Image (spheres, rainbow, N blue to C red):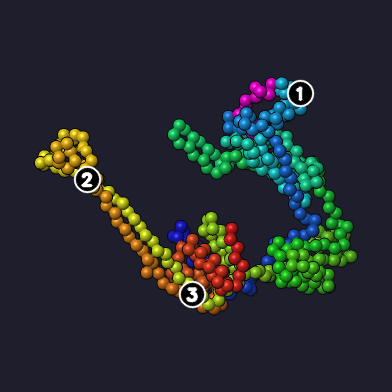
Amino acid sequence: MCTIFRPLLASLVLLAAGFGSVHADAAVRLKDIVSFEGARDNLLVGYGLVVGLNGTGDDVTKSIFTRESVIGMLDRLGVNARDAQLTVRTKNVAAVMVTATLPSSARQGSRIDVSVSAMGDANNLQGGTLVGVPLLGADGEVYAVAQGQVSVGGFSAKGAAASITQGVPTAGKVPDGAIVEREVNFDFSKLQTMNLALRNPDFTTAERVATAINAYMHGDLARATDNGTVALAIPSSMRGDVVGLMTRLEQLRIEPDQVAKVVIDEANGVIVMGENVRISTVAVAEGNLTVKITETPQVSQPNAFAPGGNAAGGQTAPGQNGVQFAPNGGAATTVVPRTNIEVDTGKDKRLAVVPQGVSIQELVNSLNALGIGPRDMISILQAIKAAGAMQADLEVH
């Protein structure tokens, strides 16, 4: 893990070293940092069955909802399976949750992708077919119907003594698997005002967005209402062409600001630090007391032809101090304990002083000079924050 992390540290140092030259080109398009009112997606969800599995579906004797769904589906198709539900033993069907995203531009009859995830104890959805699933919106209305062949990226295989699983075989996708039945109507031409929502709320960025729009429109039309919203008054001359106005505005260049933040993913040992992170004067030492105990027992075997040796391999009897004696009084084969104890006090570790106001580059250089791995670096950063020496938000996942 340490050898993998060192190139990452080197990359962080190079990025930090280049921050000074990047500021001139740090401006990004307005469309990349805001969302326009009305131009939003909607989430859809549904429940259904995947059929055609090769014995890798749900155990209907345990997954009651799968069995009831199969019987209900057959009833709707005119097959009376209610009286014979105790005989339903199929393993070729799996109950699944179906999710999709309905774009704002989706029109009736257009197709969208859907995701399928097993709910029961199915082992694999490979080769299955999703059967007519209505997809509901937050208002409970049906906006699309999904059906089609499930594409699974993972796989699993097993034999009598071993098994292997790669990816997630119980989840997959149906490309273009849903047909839109209901549109989300939104008429841009009737808008007199429009809200621009910042994807990363920040007061400075919101004010810069409003300033850039007003400079482009040559008027006082935009204002930041909070750290995440910029209200824009649509000029009367553009109310019939709001889409054209949005096309022009989204190409404006804005330099977003950001808070100083350190994000730590403890599970994977990943550390990401923003360029504005600053550290006050602090001393950092890293070293742990390590005690290593190794047991290497040895076997003591007397010479078979020596006097008293147990050449015949006869029974031995316990004697004093755990020593085994042969019936004729000689010493028998015995196990002699051997213990080796090593103590590492970390005396080769050094104490580093991080001066006040250091940048991310200097912080990484100082910690890297101590030979600190990612796990220890996470603990050090948390300790620096706890000591009040880090002028940044620390976010741990």
The secondary element bearing badge 1 is classed as loop
Q: Is residue 167 left or right of residue 144?
A: left
3 and 2 marks in contact (CB < 8 Å): no
Q: Amino acid at mark 3?
A: Ala
- The residue singled out by tag 3 in the image is 283
Q: Where residue 177 sits in the image (x, y, percent)?
A: 70, 40
Q: Is residue 194 left or right of residue 393?
A: right
Image: 366 above or below 35: below
Q: CA distance from mark 1 to mark 3?
A: 77 Å
Structural crowding at the residue carrying mark 2, measured as other residues with C-alpha within 10 Å and reported as few (<14), some (14–19) or many (≥20):
few
Image: 303 above or below 93: below
Question: Could you say which disc has been placed on residue 320 in the image?
Answer: 2
Q: Is residue 4 left or right of residue 18?
A: left
Q: Tag 3 or tag 1, which sits nearer the N-term?
A: 1
The label nearer to you, 3 versus 2, is: 2
Q: Where residue 376 sits in the image (x, y, percent)?
A: 48, 63
Q: Where residue 17 sits in the image (x, y, percent)?
A: 54, 72
- The residue singled out by tag 1 in the image is 78
Give yes or no for residue 59 being in the magenta stretch: no
Q: CA distance from mark 2 to mark 1?
A: 86 Å
- For the record, the magenta segment spans 84-94
2 and 1 marks in contact (CB < 8 Å): no
Q: Which is more toward the observer, 156 or 152?
A: 156
Q: Is residue 358 visible?
A: yes
Structural crowding at the residue carrying mark 1, measured as other residues with C-alpha within 10 Å and reported as few (<14), some (14–19) or many (≥20):
few
Q: Is residue 99 left or right of residue 358?
A: right
Q: Which is more toward the observer, 162 or 309?
A: 309
Which image quadrant for residue 21? bottom right
Residue at image coords 29%, 56%:
340
Residue at image coords 35%, 57%:
292
The secondary element bearing badge 2 is classed as helix
What secondary structure prevails in the magenta region?
Answer: loop
